[in-house]
Image (cartoon, rainbow, N blue to C red):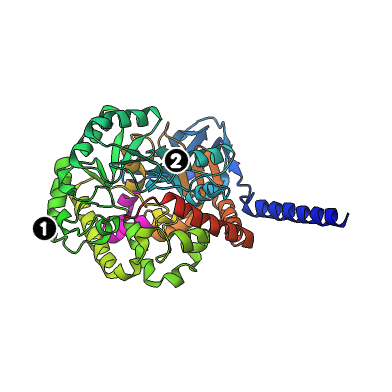
Amino acid sequence: MKAKALAAVATATVVATLGATALSLRAPSVAVPVNQNFTLTEVTIVNPGRARFEHGSIVVAGDRITVAGPRDGMQQTTTALSEFKGRYILPGLIDLHAHLPPKSLLDLSVHAGLMLAAHGVTTVRVVGDTDGSAVPAMQEAIAAGAVGPRIFNCGPFVVGKIPSRWPNSVVVERADGADQVVRQLRDQGMNCIKIYEDLDPPRLMALREAAHRYGLRMIGHLSHGIDYTAGLVDEVQHFHGVPPPASMARDHIMDRAIHWDQVSDARLGDVVEATLRNGTANTPTLSSTAALLRYRDYPATIVADDLRDMPRLYREVAWSPKSGIPFWRGIERRIPEIDQALANKRKLVRMLYDAGATLLVGTDIQQPFVIPGLSVHHEMAEFVAAGIPLEQVWAIATAGAGQALGQPLLGQLLAGAPADFLIFREDPTTSLANLDTLEAVVINGRLHRAEDLQQARTAWRAHFEDPIFDAVSMRAGRRMLAKNVLRDY
């Protein structure tokens, strides 16, 4: 009997421990109230870079804006939210270069969606993930009532050889295989294709032709040895290929990102000329380059207040310069190169803007210290630092992004447009500081008050600091790192 009693106690202890662990891993259940089918009156409607309308009204019915402007004599059919009188209404921000967390017991999809919304990001374009589960996981979370953005999906990474860097990749071994790959991605419902690594000019050209044939946008990296001026990609990410290929001593993504010491003013001029000639769009992700400068003092960075919005598995596992994803290792020794690269990238952004080239806002979420949502604010600040007027930066991050996604009404406040917009107490087109006066976020016609989103963020911070969650997530992060990083860069 004594042995049976001890066994029963042991079993009960295990069950209790597992139960406590499950509870600690469960996402915080903080309700974020919403309003649907509502009217805002006496507001300033701002379509950045296009027009603004003072003393106007916005009417939302379902997931669409039905009125944006005067409401002279119109019958009231929705609930008036008088608390927002006198406020500034702007289109929701769009991040065109996002990576989302994969599906897991940690429910980080719920957290990422919340962070994006809390910073006014109402749409993201997802440009690849580790295992293909990220977009379905966020869509499931939103369908179950979580807050999250509108999603456009580029699908898996399109690569030139196996082993690839990430499991979620499709390989195009020869140019004549491009059509089948692109057609399959189109049939799977992808909005674009993300070309990644190890692709030569014949395969790039074949992929671009197939993408155009099937109505998809081809975006992505330029592989080692490919010159930007060749114009092989519709939309280049990170300014890859701008450093002369001959200046790259090795095939490594970090070198393409920050080894800009041979990018002269003459080279920048050639890049601008080629951009206009080839009609190339650019998503420079300046903020992800700037974030690398935080490795200057890694111990101080990982305890900074803004990083409390991310669990330690990012800060101290994936992003560790000693034991994290291989291509960040030793990055602290390259701070002078990062400084130089960022200065040159800002200069190129200004030159492209002055030339009338297409620039887009994307941030490379999940790269070191690139925090969902907040990173768009940082990217906007980088564009301003490059010399672009703030209201034009807003135009790029809203209507310009909608155009790039093939959705001309997205990113605008017009009748018939998607009801994705932001409510500010102060005009954020006059000062970046006014981004902090966000009072509400509307996504798909659902209005979420900023104070409720902030309450949910606070709950998630506490959740990340729970000792059981912290211990389990750190172990899980190390396992995922070993499983998903298939080779170094």
Q: Main secondary structure of the magenta part?
A: helix
Compared with 208, 262 (above or below) is below
Describe residue 398's horizontal placement relative to residue 444 as left or right: left
Which secondary structure lies at badge 2? Answer: loop
Of 425 and 168, which appears nearest the observer?
A: 168
- Residue 119 can be seen, yes or no: no
Q: CA distance from mark 2 to mark 1?
A: 41 Å
Local packing at callout 2 (Cα closer than 10 Å; few below 14, some 14-19, many 20+) is some
Describe residue 468's horizontal placement relative to residue 73 as left or right: right
Which secondary structure lies at badge 1? Answer: helix
Give residue 322's position: percent from left, percent from top.
41, 66
Foreground mark, 2 or 1, reads 2
Describe residue 267's horizontal placement relative to residue 474 as left or right: left
Residue at the spot of label 2: 132
Question: In the rendered image, which quarter is residue 403 located in?
Answer: top left
| Residue segment shown in magenta | 378-395
Q: Amino acid at mark 2?
A: Gly
Compared with 409, 471 (above or below) is below
- Residue 123 can be seen, yes or no: yes
Figure quadrant of the C terminus? bottom left
Give residue 253's position: percent from left, percent from top.
29, 55
Residue 124 drawn in magenta:
no
Residue at the spot of label 1: 266
